[in-house]
Image: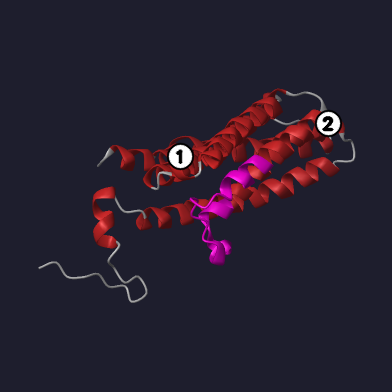
Amino acid sequence: MDLKDAFALLHPAIAVVIVFPLIGMVVNRAILVRQRRLLTKAGEKSKIPPIVGSEHVETGLWLSIAVVGVALIGLAFAITSKMIAKDVLTTDPLRVVFVAVMFIVTTASMTFLCRSKVTIWKVVFAVLTSMGLIVIGCQPEVYRLDRQWFISHYYYGVASAILMIISVAIAQDIYKDKSDRWRTAHIILNCLALLLFLGQGITGARDLLDIAPSWQASYLGKCDFTNKACPQIK
């Protein structure tokens, strides 16, 4: 395996080792928080400790950071490797600079979003982070599978990342809202995100089969993918 192939595996490796375990932890804490809240609301004593609430918020924040981070890593590899192969720095240096700036701005916006305590700034940084992901993902080097967007790993990934960004932005409002509308929105959005995560696991495994090691790429380029046939080696 060449160094390029090792970098290609960085995105799925982080997803498997960090993101998906965090998803399990967040879902577990979410169920416990809901059970405790319903018991308390009914006037019953719950054996679930109050700390599960803060644990849910904290692990949810780390999950959001991990999801956005792994999305940026995946996009960075796809864009950088193809830009180097096509020598885009020479043919279109301004776009290279623009993309680099967008990565910096998006990362900084996510950092400020996690640190901000003021609602208006949370909204601003959430929008900037989301727009940054979308603009970076629109680069021609990114494999999006546009005609089959409904089974695209890229679209699942960006959508789930934006939902995680929204979750961070509204986290404080959930506890301030006595009508539970923000809590209901949070539950709905994150149930959708969970479905997208499941889709990412499936589409990600599928896409790994499509990414050949660099030393096999020249041969596989001769294959007829429509008829599922490759030239015979004599």
- Residue 183 placed where, x, y %? 79, 41
- Residue 143 placed where, x, y %? 48, 54
Above-or-below relation of 68 to 213: above
Residue placed furthest toward the right: 179
Q: Nearer the viewer, residue 60 or 126?
A: 126
Identify the residue at horizontal 68%, vertical 24% (top origin). Answer: 51
Residue 36 visible, this orientation: no
Above-or-below relation of 193 to 52: below
Residue placed furthest toward the bottom: 227
62 horizontally vs 2: left or right: right
Mark 2 nearby-residue class (10 Å; few <14, some 14–19, many ≥20):
few
124 horizontally vs 98: left or right: right
Identify the residue at horizontal 57%, vertical 53% (top origin). Answer: 156
120 horizontally vs 77: left or right: right
The residue pinned by badge 2 equals 120
**Amino acid at pointer 2:** Ile
Name the secondary structure under disc 1: helix
Main SS, magenta residues: helix
Q: Which residues are magenta?
A: 131-156
The residue pinned by badge 1 equals 89
Q: Quadrant of residue 149?
A: bottom right
